[in-house]
Every structure is written in C-alpha cells, then in structure tokens.
Amino acid sequence: MSFEKAEQLMELAIMAAAHYSGIRLDDVTERFGCSRRTAQRMLRTLEAKFIDTETHLDDDGRKRWRLPQTATRDLMTLLPDELAALDLGIEALARAGDNVEARQLSRLKEKILSLVPRSKAARLETDYEALLEAQGFAARPGPRPNADPAIMAVISDGIKACHFVDITYQGREETNSRERRIAPLGVLLGLRKYVVARVAEDMNGRLRLFRANGIRSARITSTAFTRDANFNLKEFSTRAFGTFQNDKEFGEIVWRFAPPAVDQAKEFLFHPSQRFELQADGSLLVRFEAAGHLEMCWHLYAWGDQVEVVSPPKLAEMVNPYRRADFPALP
C-alpha cells in the first residue's frame, strides 16, 4: 500500500469513528473527491484492515460503516496545521463580531488539546508556534475571489519549510503570466488573498504582495532561504486597512461621522489603531494609521453622506464628491 493510500485509509477510519451513526458511500465520495467505485474499494479496505468495522442499514435503507472510537484512538495525532486553522477560525469569528461562537470554538480547542498526550504536545507546540508566525490575518466579511486550494497548499508548504517556490504569476496590469521564484513569508486573508514574499533575486529588497488568484501554478523547490527573524506578519498586516498596502499611502487617516451615524460607527472596529474623538457638534472623528485607499473607498461608500474624509486630501478627493444620501440603512 502506498503512503498516500495509507493516509487516506487513516482519514477514512477517523471519519468512521467520528460519526456515531456511521458514514455512507456518498460521504466518502464527497470527502475524497473520488468515484463511487473507488469509494467502495476504500470501504472494503477499511473492513479488511479494521476488523472492528460495523455495517448497518439506516432508516433510508442505505448502508453505513462505523468504527468504535477505541479503534483509532492510539493512531490519531493532532497536526500543527489543524491547530493553526482552529486559531484562524477563532480570530475570524472574533473579527466578525461573533464573540460567543469564538469563545465556544476556543473552548473546543482547549478540550482537544487536553486529550493530546504530553509527550506529543511538546513537539506539537514548537511546530504550531512556528506556523502561527507565518499566518497573517486581516479578514473582512463579504465576497472575495477564490484561490486554488492546491496552489495555496504549495505556498503553505513553502512557508513552513522556508523553501523557495516557483510560481507562474500574472499581475493585474499584465497581459501574460511569467515565471517568478519567491520566498513566501505568509498569507494575508481578506477581500483579496495575498501571498507576502520576497523575490529570489532581491532578498534584501522590499516585501511584495502577490494576489493568490493571480498565481496560475506553484511548485516548491529544494532550495531553502533564511527567514528574516525581524519580520512579523501580524505587524505588517496592521499597516493596511484591508489586505493590500502601498507604502506611499501609509499615514494618519481621519474620518468624520455625522451625528446620526455616530452610534453605529462606535460599534465598528475600523482598524486596530483607531481612536475615537467625540466632537462638540455631536459628530465623531475616527483616527488611525494605515494604507490602502482603494479598500477604504469601498467601505466608506456604504456610509453614504454620513461620513466625510478629513485627511488625507488624496483619499478625500476619491470619496467626498461621490457620497450618496439615499441609502436606506447604514452598514
């Protein structure tokens, strides 16, 4: 049995043990993206390799496969990627204002960790902390372009291994894609997903942002690079209002919300560095330091004529002349 098939068998066994009522053929085809014939072959292998496998027909007459939880308990291990994904989910819920769900997911994480043997937990923690340092998060709810999961898996491997990745990339203003070798440092999530990297031919140069959906292909190389110990992706991400940032735009941002919109504006976290200043006329000034004027415009437009850009002048020119007064509700 190949290593890949062994991994799939393990994942299938964990599925069968995790579902009290068992798993159906359709569950297997959906999880593994395979045909029904392949799913049937995998389930026959499950029965052969795990003699405790139970089968029964459900109320709809469909066959289900089930394993006792004890059958896989000693074989399971928690991966750093899975633990980091839990943290990203917790942060995503918190940033979206779903604090109750964020706390529930945090408690679930603690319960999972309590089941990990201490000998494995020590090794897990080291890899997990290293992975978290490579995870950036600046998410905004709403529609966003899709990124190829297979490509992003290669980028993720390059980040964790500190290996260069060869990509085929097409910039927004480019008509054709071209080959690049990059040193990926992290990923920013938001209205657009960006890979933060340095290009191989200029490792001491500025950080570059590559749109994830502009990457046509990716291949990890065997060549390692040295990660800058002073680089902090979370600090880097907070320089932007959304995900994209332009150093030339970075500076103090000042918005004035009209009195009718003040209560609503106070409920928003526009940026981690924001400061509120209530004015004598009942309006509210919001100040923070960030870049990303275009993404600010996209957000400010939703406030209609209830917000005015005070500073910087360039952003004010982009927003103030186009405010509408006929929006029936505020964000």
Image (tube, rainbow, N blue to C red):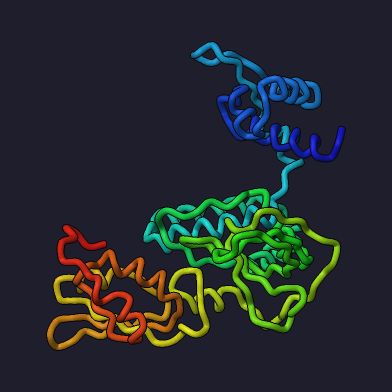
Residue 99 left/right relative to 108: left
Q: Can residue 91 be seen in this view?
A: no
The residue located at (74%, 75%) in the rendering is 227
| Vertical comparison of 299 with 282: above or below | above
Which quarter shows the N terminus? top right
| Vertical comparison of 119 with 311: above or below | above
Q: Which residue lies furthest to the top in this view?
A: 61
Residue 21 left/right relative to 144: right
Q: State the image coordinates of residue 98 (x, y, percent, origin top left).
A: 38, 57
Q: State the image coordinates of residue 139 (x, y, percent, origin top left).
A: 47, 63
Q: Is residue 54 visible?
A: yes
Q: State the image coordinates of residue 290 (x, y, percent, origin top left).
A: 44, 80
Please state which of residues 219 and 11 is positioned toward the viewer in this rendering.
219
| Vertical comparison of 85 with 24: above or below | below
In which image quadrant can residue 206 be found?
A: bottom right
Please state which of residues 153 and 96 is positioned toward the viewer in this rendering.
153
The residue located at (72%, 79%) in the rendering is 228
The residue located at (41%, 69%) in the rendering is 295
Please state which of residues 101 and 303 is positioned toward the viewer in this rendering.
303
In which image quadrant can residue 274 be found?
A: bottom left
The residue located at (80%, 39%) in the rendering is 4
Residue 141 left/right relative to 86: left
Q: State the image coordinates of residue 211 (x, y, percent, origin top left).
A: 58, 63
Which quarter shows the C terminus? bottom left
Q: Which residue lies furthest to the left in this view?
A: 281
Query: What number of labels is visible?
Result: 0
Please state which of residues 203 and 179 is positioned toward the viewer in this rendering.
179
Residue 313 left/right relative to 32: left
